[in-house]
Amino acid sequence: MAYIPEFTITPLLLSEVEQVAALRERIQSAVVNIAWIPALQKDTRTRNVHASTAIEGNPLTLEQVRALEEGRELSASGTRHKREVLNYFAGLRHVEKTATKKTIRHADILELHRILAGEVMDQGEAGKYRMIAVRVGQYRPPPADAVSGLMFELLEWWNAASQQLSPVLSSAILHYRFEAIHPFADGNGRTGRALALWELYRRGFDIHHLFSVDEYYWEDRPKYYAALEGVRQAGEDLTAWLEYCAAGLRQTLERVWLRIQTFQVKSPDKLVLRPRQGQLLHLLRDHGSMAPGEIWKALGVSRQGAMDLLRPLLDAGLVEKIGGKKTGRYVLRNT
């Protein structure tokens, strides 16, 4: 029995997909043969690892994840938390290396899970489909004896019919269906998000590997889980889930564009945006200009905290202050 996803191309979904396509083209044309691509790839990989492991409860901060990637020791952190992070780095590198693989088989899914879940499984065995019943909140995934057949149907769809869809849609469908099958005893969330990224890479959507959509899921985990649950409540209609994922990819690409600008500025020091700095740049883009008080209120930080965020952006030439000392406002600088 073939897997046939159910969804409707609504005006909202069509608009999101079109905006994603336009942003992608702008980014791809901007980064060809630019020397700073490796640095941006490294930053993206770190953000992806931090976000996807944090969704599952890993407490390591972005800076701690970055430290592990650079081979630095963490003074206080559990062995399992470190292993989850290092596994995910290895998993992303594996996905990047196999991005051009034309046909994905069971063995490929099992190998990815083995890399991601090795030594961090609460139950079951890494790299093997589950042999037990599992429960995710109120949801009971299919019985263990149905997993192999359902995964066969999903792989058949992924390797053939999915190619007729935009990768924006096919990656989201793959993400949901994998989570619904829940083929492993543990580690399904991380594996499902890695597979969605793999689909974008395979389809040539993210040639330079600069997109970290998992940050979007992590920043509002309740909304992420509600969007997944919403498909089941809608009788497996994926429309709202696709709208949610497309909006997330659009927001992700908007952030990528801002980060690209940080690497294009004429500054002796490379600037790696902290999450709140990325949020600040989005606020300035949306509002046009903001007074200091508006900034620290919107970010929920003190006046000094706002200045600590602003100063590197001012020094790098991304943001500038206009107006007088008392009436001055901050704006994005045209680069």
Image (cartoon, rainbow, N blue to C red):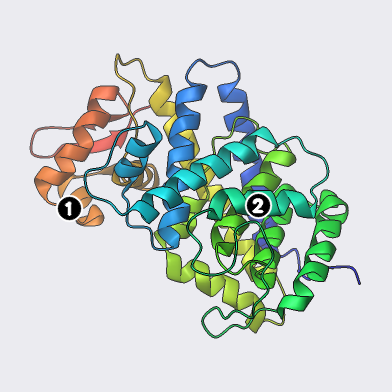
Disc 1 from disc 2: Cα separation: 36 Å
Determine whether 216 is above or below 223 in the image.
Answer: above
Q: Nearer the viewer, residue 35 or 191?
A: 191
Q: How many numbered marks are there?
A: 2
Residue at the limit of the structure toward the bottom, as seen here: 138
Q: Residue at x 60, y 56 (%)?
A: 191
Relative depth, front residue between 34 and 142: 142
Q: What SS does tag 1 mark?
A: loop
Whether 313 is drawn above or below 156: the answer is above
Which residue is pictured at 37% across the width and 20% down the height?
265
Q: Which amino acid type is shown beneath numbered disc 1?
A: Val
Left or right of 291: which side holds 20? right
Residue at image mark 2: 195
- For the point 62% across and 62% down, which residue is it? 243
Residue 235 place in picture, x, y as percent: 71, 82
Residue type at mark 2: give it. Leu
